[in-house]
Image: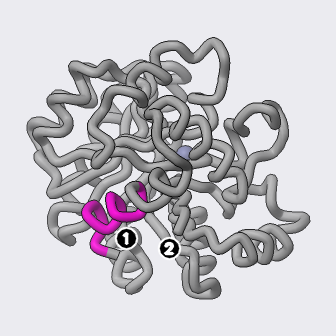
Amino acid sequence: MFVDVHAHLDDEAFDSDREEVLEKIKEAGIMVINAGSDIASSQMSVKLAKEHDLIYACVGVHPHDAQNVQKDYIKELEELAKNSKVVGIGEIGLDYYYDLSDRETQKRIFIEQLDLAKSLNLPVVIHDRDAHQDTLDILKDSRPAKGLMHCYSGSLEMAQELIRLGFYFSFGGVITFKNAKKPKEVASKLPLERILLETDCPYLSPEPYRGKRNDPTRIPVIAKTLAELRGITVDEIKDITFANLRCLGGL
Ligand SMILES: [Zn+2]
């Protein structure tokens, strides 16, 4: 089975036709892990997972929203994580490209959620944009049980360190872009047993749909590119990534 390990089906981009999109995903038989980005979207993520068999949820606060958290947000996340379809804490991390929250706040909120994941024994889903060194330092310090680097944009060297920490890596539409030299190279060289597929929908549609709204039914398009990069078949990619998900999340 194909799995989209990182989607935002709660995004307002799906407000007008979410049920139709969910029906399409069901018909395609694609499993989806929906990420939370703040408390409201984490609640929505859990709601979608409760209502749909093939949808699972992560709950967490994105670095963009770090400065907006309320005092008791960890309690709220912990409460949400009690649902049996919650499979991880995310997406959490650091974003020094947009810097929408100041960096000290981003780090504090990141670390607090890493601590929560450890206490619940859940994997973490990490967002790292232009913050590679601080992300790595914090993860080395915190040592979460397992985790996923979503839309991985770091180097192969950094990946080796993350593998030692128990991390997996997911790739999306970016590896289909002609100018994405580095992500293509990293996706072609990382150990296959650490790789997963994601859409990050509604963002980052693969070629030839670049710029259009993305959704989980585009996972086979991304799988085709990865299969070409690795010199194996799309079916092999499907089987390997599913097996990897089981190792990562015990689904
Ligand atoms: Zn995302």
Residue placed most toward the observer, 100 or 226: 226
Q: Is residue 106 above or below residue 80?
A: above
The residue at which mark 2 appears reads as 56
139 lies left or right of 68: left
Q: Is residue 4 above or below residue 193?
A: below
Element at badge 1?
strand
Residue placed most toward the observer, 142 or 150: 150
**Crowdedness near tag 1: few (<14), some (14–19) or many (≥20) residues, C-alpha within 10 Å:** many
Q: Quadrant of residue 244?
A: bottom left
Mark 1 or 2, nearer chain start: 2
Residue placed most toward the observer, 38 or 248: 248
The x and y percentages for residue 11 are 71, 56
The x and y percentages for residue 109 are 33, 45
x 57%, y 29%: residue? 175
Looking at the rendered structure, the kind of residue marked 1 is Val
The residue at which mark 1 appears reads as 87
Magenta span main SS: helix
